[in-house]
Image (cartoon, rainbow, N blue to C red):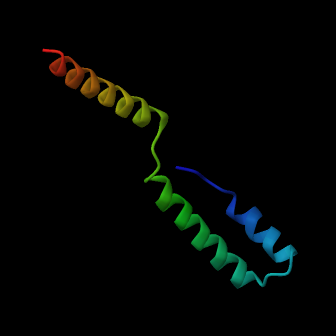
Amino acid sequence: MLYIDTLKTVNELVDSGFEGKQAKTLVSIFNECLNTQLGRLATKDDLDRTAKECKAEINEKIGRAHV
């Protein structure tokens, strides 16, 4: 899970002209979207595992083709 400093981000938005309520709402929505989408990302381990599975399947099919 990725964390952002929501207070700092809200303060930066307020300093740049957002109203407090707008800044809080925007940061809340952004934080929720960010954390929701992170669960859908593949990790390096996921990619390595998938690559090994693909290589094994290819080798298996190549081995059958030469029989």
Give the x, y percent position of residue 62: 24, 21
Q: Residue at x 35, y 34 (%)?
A: 50
Q: Residue at x 61, y 53 (%)?
A: 3
Left or right: 48 with respect to 55? right
Give residue 19's quadrant in the image.
Answer: bottom right
Question: Which residue, as the protein is rendered here, is positioned at the far front?
Answer: 66
Q: Is residue 10 above or below residue 1?
A: below
In this view, the residue in front, 25 or 65, is 65
Q: Is residue 27 above or below residue 52?
A: below
Give residue 65's quadrant in the image.
Answer: top left
Q: Residue at x 80, y 70 (%)?
A: 11
Give the x, y percent position of residue 4: 66, 56
Name the image quarter holding the C terminus: top left
Give the x, y percent position of residue 38: 50, 53
In this view, the residue in front, 51 or 67, is 67
In this view, the residue in front, 9 or 33, is 33
Left or right: 61 with respect to 55? left
Give residue 64's quadrant in the image.
Answer: top left
Q: Residue at x 70, y 84 (%)?
A: 21
